[in-house]
Image (cartoon, coloured by chain):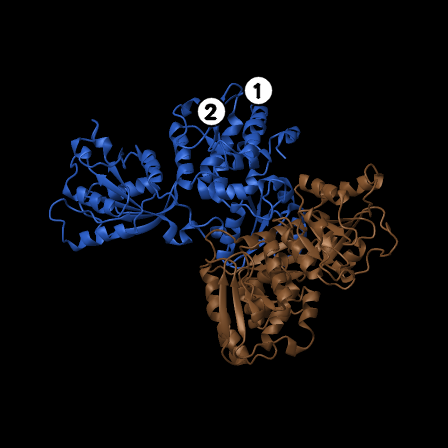
Chain colours: A brown, B blue
Amino acid sequence: MSLNATPRGQRLHIALFGRRNAGKSSLINALTGQETAIVADVPGTTTDPVSKAMEILPLGPVMLIDTAGLDDVGYLGDLRVKRSLAVLEKTDLVVLVVDPGQGTGSFEADVLSRSQARGIPVIGVANKCDLYPDPPVGAWAAALPVPWVVVSARTGQGIDRLKRALVEHAPKDWTLPTIVGDLIAPGDTVVLVIPIDKAAPKGRLILPQQQVIRDVLEHDAVAVMVKERELRHALAGMTRPPRLVVTDASAYLKAAADTPPDVLFTSFSILFARFKGDLNTLVAGAKAVDGLRPGDKVLIAEACTHHPIEDDIGRVKIPRWLRQVAGGELVFDVVAGGGPLPDNLAAYRLIVHCGGCMLNRREMLSRLMQAREAGVPVVNYGVLMAHMHGVLRRALSPFPAALAVLGEDPEGLGEEIWPCHLAKYIPQ
Amino acid sequence: MSLNATPRGQRLHIALFGRRNAGKSSLINALTGQETAIVADVPGTTTDPVSKAMEILPLGPVMLIDTAGLDDVGYLGDLRVKRSLAVLEKTDLVVLVVDPGQGTGSFEADVLSRSQARGIPVIGVANKCDLYPDPPVGAWAAALPVPWVVVSARTGQGIDRLKRALVEHAPKDWTLPTIVGDLIAPGDTVVLVIPIDKAAPKGRLILPQQQVIRDVLEHDAVAVMVKERELRHALAGMTRPPRLVVTDASAYLKAAADTPPDVLFTSFSILFARFKGDLNTLVAGAKAVDGLRPGDKVLIAEACTHHPIEDDIGRVKIPRWLRQVAGGELVFDVVAGGGPLPDNLAAYRLIVHCGGCMLNRREMLSRLMQAREAGVPVVNYGVLMAHMHGVLRRALSPFPAALAVLGEDPEGLGEEIWPCHLAKYIPQ
């Protein structure tokens, strides 16, 4: 099963509006990197709203609704227009595409007022900027009080900035449709390895554990919970192997050792790195750890100012281990708190972000995209911990795209080349 | 394993103080119904504090600490006295036993002030009331500002009132040491049947489910969670049967049908009826349902004023079903809210209590004991629901003492004698 099989109800629904030939269809292609819409120079090629479940990297699965190209004149009362505007009833975000040579008029004002009446955010896109070398956002833009992003669907310019704007205007509670549901089939068994230590709240399960159990049950599968010590025993008691083993990061080595090689294996923190952000971006960040050299600057970014347990990981264990990998001193800066990351990101060779339990998907993705725009690799605690334990490749086994980012070359992975004596620096 | 095998740290620790021959040891026997201490008329038979893990019905497992009998004169500085007073460091409740013929003096005042200094509640017991037909609590009692309970350890008079006082002065967070831990051995598998319906909070598990999972893991066992539809499939995938199946009450019939007869079976609500109250008392209440006759008064007691789901059960489904069983109209009163039950309990033929999710063990037990004192049977929604579904005997399979209360006689059970046409009145 793929993410495309998940219910469309939870996908971010993005509706594109614009006059004929403003370039909506080619903008969709630029966002998705696919030739999915008919692109032509003839005005009005798209005639009816077309909804397509698509993947926009690194946003994840979205529903793009390509409305009919509409003229500024005489559009009211047109059946096609009614059908186009009806999509607002199921839209999270409106993208209003404008050809700077035409500017805006009553059509754009109408889309804006109808969207605002429904509380739907509108992003203005000034397309075809490659054709207009002067600043293409003119007085017509000021008449429409929306955030404007200047792009060229043809050259790709500004597309990353538009993606970030999409994230920043997504609904607060926007998530992926599932945590593990796309990895399992009905009747499968998922084993969850949950150490009971002093940090665990008495008589309770932490929220990520509850969320994964619920997700497994909602997908008609069986959830088996064990402490790390009973994992081998539990596996021996099954007539067929589980589809997936998910471990708490504190039991990586024991759980990986006791899980048969042909069983998919990952951790709660990697599942939530994907659910709350973009796993591929973080895996690319883990790879970049190998390129650290003495003197490099590293930014430790924590989303809140009060997590004593992660403090120890972020401020002691990870810096110590990164120094070992770099073979010398590194310069560490620490930022803590919400909001965007600092402006001077380009000064850093690597960003190490906390798990982001206090951030929603919108906030976490926004930070990852900010790092991408600055050209700085970013990894988080969960993915880096897997790397430090030498189990990152194993813990990515359910995620082929992330494995592709890691690459086949063991030198690009790290865990096969770290000398064994580094094991003592691994957090226990 | 029995409840005696649970860690003593969570048992209610009750220390008995009193002068030689005040009758501490025979009071222990009266509380536990066992001959566990040496009872003699010779003063000071008990010489050193003796801690014993015991079961006081319906309180559950407690630790009774029988201190040395002490004289009022010259007791200070005595090594025995020091050892006796040292038990205050691990005591939740002090019971101060007094022979009314002797009254109180500086010894009792000293025990009280030392207990108060540690925040430990003290209950005064005027023992041997059978020997003092006049009100035996004299002026000496007024000198000691504690609640006094008049008992005779020899005849049993007042013992139930003393038990209720013990409950009412127990620490607020007092619970049993475990929910399922005494039913399972390390390596056992416990299957939890959890329907995912609209009432379930999105992406979460309700607290009782979390508590049972944690308890299973802490006892080195394996927790398997399934929806009712996957139960049969999950059982087929095990190389040996689970030790126990625990179902949500909404899936009683399906879960009971799919669980092999030799596997222990119960429900979350019955586990918590035991954890939070006294299962045997509630089972006796379920039996009493069979004796209802037209015109009988039934009290529906809810602990809070805002649970719309239980309202439907308590105010519609249960009354309808009880009328069917009685073969005619019944008189229903409803009380809602915390605090003690109404004073006129003796007017009722049966009390039907809600699950008590808003009550702690102390509050729930206190209500059950209030009903016992009034001589009125009391059942709760969870136990009654099992009875209404015809699965009460099955759902008590892990609890031999509760099964003994139910009795061997099918006429005392109900589920084998209800005509099938009543099934349509069973809440779904």
Name the amino acid type tagged 1.
Gly
Chain assignment, label 1: B
Relative to B256, residue B302 above or below: above
Q: Is residue B8 left or right of residue B407?
A: left
Nearest the camera: B186 or A190?
A190
Residue B159 in the image, given as x and y percentages of width and height: 32, 35
Q: Secondary structure at mark 2?
A: loop
Residue drawn at point x = 18 percent, y = 42 percent: B109
Q: Which residue is mark 2?
A: B349
Quarter of the image for residue B369 reads top left
Tag shown at residue B328: 1
| Front residue of this view, candidates A171 and B75 | A171
Q: Position of residue A330 (x, y in %)?
A: 51, 76
Residue at the image point whose x is 30% and y is 33% from the top: B158
Residue drawn where x is 23% and y is 47% of the image: B117
Secondary structure, mark 1, is: loop
Crowd class of label 1 (few under 14; some 14 to 19; many from 20; radius 10 Å): few
Up-down: is A330 above or below B381? below
Residue B393 figure quarter: top right
Q: Are marks 1 and 2 in contact (CB under 8 Å)?
A: no
Where residue B335 appears, as percent x and y from the top left, is 46, 27
Residue, far left: B74
From the top left corner, tell me how far across and down residue A360 is, in percent: 58, 53
Q: Chain of mark 2?
A: B
